[in-house]
Image (cartoon, rainbow, N blue to C red):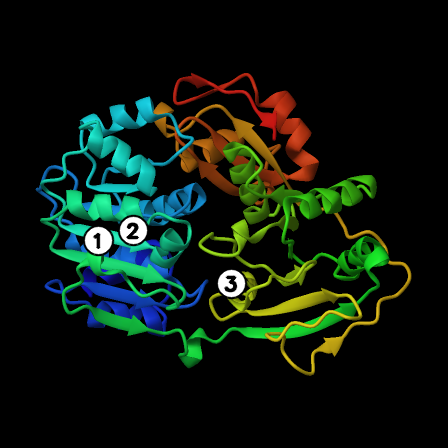
Amino acid sequence: MTKINSILERLRIEQLNDMQQAVIQSFDTEKDFILLSPTGSGKTLAFALLIEQLLQEQKQGIQVIIVIPTRELALQIESVIRKVTKGQKIVCCYGGHDSRSEKKSLVDPPSILIGTPGRIIYHIEKGHIQTADVHTLVLDEYDKCLELGFQEQLEIIMTALPQVSRKILVSATKLVEPPPYFSLQTPVTVDFLNHEQGQPNIQFKKVISPAQYKLKTLFRLICSLGNKKILIFCNHRDAVDHISELLDDRNLIHDIFHGGLEQRDRELSLLKFRNNSNRILITTDLAARGLDIPEVDTIIHYQLPIKEEAFVHRNGRTARMHASGEVVLLLKPDDSFPYLPHDTEEILLEEEYDLPPNTPFSTLYIPLGRKNKVNKIDIVGYLLQSKDIQKEDVGLIEVKDKESFIAVRREVASKIIQQYSNGKIKGNKVKFYRT
């Protein structure tokens, strides 16, 4: 536990939660492992700590492969794994990313490979990945992988890795049984799905609105929530776009997130929601699970899903990690869904509300990243070199391979663009842009 304690201290985490402690205590290096725990309970950190224990420092080649269903989840997990396994080479590969760049990164094999099923198979078949040294296979959101139709791809990956010593399966549900070709060997299971800690502290409310006034009612509801951080769920992309058009007309800052957007636009929407440049995100069920969207105060169901499972996953975006949360159902008078909670408090909205205040931060962008040897400390140091910018003016910074995103106070954003775009960071010319 000494090594784990030093990692937690470095990450400024006071202690592991009950689930994470159970994972550490129950894990047997000689057996396969299944972790079942609700969305937002800290599963990624739990299995990242297991991986850190399993890595052999002097060993060359890929030791761990982590398979995930979506690109967004791949990037999220990469971020957590990098923090936990500091100093280890990690490569993340997924559809829509430059495969040639990935191939270059794989020439000197990483210790950990993270990727979507199709892209991992591509690199295996092209000979870019040598699998002989892989001892651990992690399948995160394995039920989602199966739900999305990756059965054949997962079987190909399993067949390509006959020598793995252990498989770690992670999920927020147990609605899907692992198929036989997973070949699990007397797995140890840690199940926190019905554990007291796993039950979120959510308050359910409802707003009743005739169908023809639903958009206007949603706007009044958003305004009534003031400066709360809001995630609005729809069943279809068209509904997301219609709501976005309304909020644009009313000059209300927001972002959208759905499968019809380009990958970079989706990543940017999530990034700005995380760093408090935006407090309203309108989305489909693409954001209902597997993504790290912290500190959401209120979930609004503009449209209710058909399946109860989707309803549960949507609600899991709030009340994460022991926080409390609020779920508001926007219902037509004749709406009836068997899974809805009984005795839900009804909200009676006023006719008019003031517009919510703007968020305190704005996101700036520089075309420099890890490939330029630039890190967060370099960026902060550059911005604080004069007295015009204070430490409190700089918020969350996310450094990617070839670019970085910096949250700054809105009142200093223009000053940074005008006055800080002629210098250098680590010998690289720097220019700031608005996102």
Residue in the picture at 85% in, 55% down: 354
Q: Are marks 1 and 2 in contact (CB under 8 Å)?
A: yes
Q: On the picture, is 380 further left or further right than 225?
A: left
How many labels, in total? 3
The residue beneath circle 2 is 84
Residue 83 disc label = none
The residue beneath circle 3 is 313
Residue in the picture at 54% in, 39% down: 266
Q: What secondary structure is found at the residue carrying circle 1?
A: helix
**Residue, far right:** 351
Can residue 91 be seen in the rendering of this structure? no
* Residue 65 drawn at (x, y percent): 23, 45
Q: CA distance from mark 1 to mark 2?
A: 7 Å
Residue 52 disc label = 1
Q: CA distance from mark 1 to mark 3?
A: 29 Å
Q: On the picture, is 216 further left or further right than 1?
A: right
Mark 2 vs mark 3: give the one in front: 3
What amino acid does circle 3 point to?
A: His
Name the quarter where the C terminus is drawn: top right
Label 1 vs 3, first from the N-terminus: 1
